[in-house]
């Protein structure tokens, strides 16, 4: 299951990030951070993780992810890897791949298991041509190109690619989360139950049945989760 999360960053926050990137050019070749297989298909730029700019920007995005209730409910993150930044232009692309199961923080080298992927778009769709994120899952192929500030969250087990950017520049932030619930299907069921409880609460307020469903949610999370 994939989730489109609108306004993870406000337009003002996106503008601040883009301004900081422009004032302090820290882009390096993305192939430096790719595994052996990926270097053959990856053609983009990433912000140097050793730069001060990276330290500021990754904290900013990390906090935006951590404080977003929809992302919390959907991903149930146990650990969030410090977010990274990429830039595609001049035909830049990233061919079909599944991300590595384990990723290390560029800041402190701690490892996480990648259960859930997130991409936050930092360019508006009309700023570039191509550059769609294509995610394949058991329901087919999904084409994703979102407004700046919006995010797509999807299981890291999915095969995915970024199409060539044929005009303009596509800037995004991306990272992975280790979830308290490793299984995609269990995580989707918990999310759907949580959303249904929220909606019921809004429609009819707190009542015994809503309380019972909430208890049920927490008992399932206790059963499936690992903190
Ligand atoms: Ni990837």
Image (tube, rainbow, N blue to C red):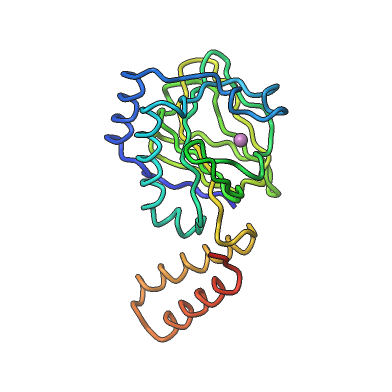
Indicate the quadrant where residue 54 lies. top left
Ligand 1 position by quadrant: top right
Farthest top residue in view: 90
- Identify the residue shown where x is 51% and y is 49%: 3
Image coords of residue 31 (percent x, y): 61, 22
Image coords of residue 202 (percent x, y): 35, 70
Q: Nearer the viewer, residue 161 or 42?
A: 42
- Identify the residue shown where x is 57% and y is 67%: 225
Image coords of residue 84 (percent x, y): 48, 34
Compared with residue 146, is residue 200 higher up or lower down, i.e. above or below?
Answer: below
- Identify the residue shown where x is 45% and y is 38%: 120
- Identify the residue shown where x is 55% and y is 19%: 29
Q: Nearer the viewer, residue 42 or 34?
A: 34
Q: Nearer the viewer, residue 47 or 194?
A: 47
Q: Nearer the viewer, residue 178 or 204?
A: 178
Compared with residue 3, is residue 172 higher up or lower down, i.e. above or below?
Answer: above
Farthest bottom residue in view: 208
Q: Is residue 159 left or right of residue 24?
A: right
Farthest front residue in view: 108
Q: Is residue 103 left or right of residue 204?
A: right
Tag count in the figure?
Answer: 0
Image coords of residue 197 (percent x, y): 44, 71
């Amino acid at each position: 299951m994939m989730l489109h999360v609108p306004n993870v960053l406000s337009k003002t926050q996106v503008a601040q990030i883009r301004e900081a990137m422009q004032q302090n050019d820290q882009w390096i070749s993305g192939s430096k951070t790719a595994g052996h297989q990926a270097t053959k298909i990856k053609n983009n730029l990433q912000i140097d993780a050793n730069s001060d700019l990276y330290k500021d920007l990754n904290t900013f995005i990390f906090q935006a992810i951590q404080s977003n209730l929809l992302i919390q409910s959907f991903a149930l993150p146990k650990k969030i890897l410090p977010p990274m930044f990429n830039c595609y232009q001049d035909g830049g692309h990233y061919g079909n791949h599944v991300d590595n199961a384990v990723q290390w923080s560029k800041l402190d080298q701690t490892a996480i298991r990648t259960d859930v992927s997130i991409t936050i778009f930092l360019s508006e769709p009309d700023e570039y041509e191509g550059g769609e994120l294509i995610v394949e899952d058991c329901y087919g192929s999904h084409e994703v190109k979102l407004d700046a500030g919006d995010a797509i969250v999807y299981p890291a087990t999915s095969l995915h690619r970024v199409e060539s950017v044929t005009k303009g520049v596509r800037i995004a932030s991306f990272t992975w989360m280790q979830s308290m619930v490793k299984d995609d299907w269990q995580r989707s069921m918990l999310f759907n139950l949580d959303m249904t409880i929220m909606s019921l609460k809004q429609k009819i307020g707190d009542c015994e049945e809503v309380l019972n469903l909430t208890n049920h949610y927490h008992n399932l999370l206790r059963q499936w989760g690992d903190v």
